[in-house]
Image (cartoon, rainbow, N blue to C red):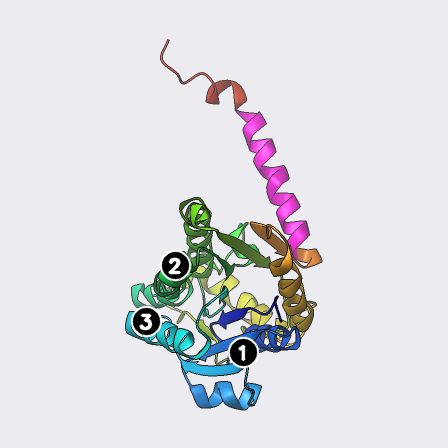
Amino acid sequence: MSNKKVWFVTGASRGMGVEFVKAALAAGHAVVASGRDTDRVSKALGQSNDLLAVRLDVTSRADAGAATEAAVDRFGRIDVLVNNAASFYAGYFEELTPEQFDRQLAASLIGPMNVTRAVLPVMREQRSGHIISISSSAGLAAGFEFVSAYAASKFGLEGWMESLQAEVAPFGITTTIVNPGFFRTELLTEQSTSYAEPSIADYDERRGPLVEYWKSQNGRQSGDPAKLARALITIARQEPPPRRFIAGADAVATAEQKVADLKAQIEANRGLSTSLAFD
């Protein structure tokens, strides 16, 4: 197939990652499916001549390099990288420990950087490639409590990706930021979400209802991960692909509200803002 590509998907043992791999295989592509436990990846996805399961803890630069080498050894190239692996540390900023915050950034920000750093030399040599990074609505607008660590990692991811786009475009490499809303994945399960330990009395009244809210949302999210996966196949075919894809009606509403808020804040102080040059 002339349009057959090699996809490299991180976090492919469960959740969105599994759906991304299945959709790419169904579309006739070859896929490198990575995860910290290759047995879990294989169990979730089965066997195929077009599928390679590789071990990858995205926080390990050595793992990223080895997984990339394995991908090229098997398929000869990497056309689409999907930075999907992430974690969720929920809680008030003051109650999250520095170590928890570090782990959030390591998984959801530094991790995608580690994998992309390993893959970019392959794409540069090809003079082609597409880097897709899964962000969140919380990477666009996070004016709500309990997600400071997660939002920090996703806002960082977006700033890095926007700048990276300008750096790699001359090599024929494109980038896409994906902002999903609430999708019915395993992000809110006990295996994926870690909560801050209660430690500050001033937050006691608000903390309990918030924890219950987040736990109650598991399995009730409106977004269908399989449909998102098929949407990724669609945008990856576009020439050029979009630099940003807002995924889900709730995510679109969040983005529109963010745009409106920014416009209002600009207008509120336009005179003062534009009066700051040297006379």
Tag 2's secondary structure? helix
Whether residue 186 is visible, yes or no, is: no
The CA distance from mark 2 to mark 3 is 16 Å
The residue indicated by pointer 3 is: 65
The image quarter in which residue 187 lies: bottom right
View extreme (top): residue: 279
- Which tag is nearer the camera, tag 1 or tag 3? 3
Question: Which is nearer the N-term, disc 1 or disc 2?
Answer: 2
Q: Looking at the rendered structure, which numbered label has been put on residue 9? A: none
Residue type, mark 3 in image: Gly
225 inside magenta stretch: no
Q: Looking at the rendered structure, which numbered label has been put on residue 125? A: 2
The CA distance from mark 1 to mark 2 is 40 Å
Q: Is residue 90 above or below residue 272?
A: below
Residue 102 in the image: x percent, y percent?
32, 64
Pointer 1 local density, CA inside 10 Å: few below 14, some 14–19, many at least 20: some
Q: Is residue 197 above or below residue 243?
A: below
The image quarter in which residue 92 lies: bottom left
Whether residue 201 is visible, yes or no, is: yes
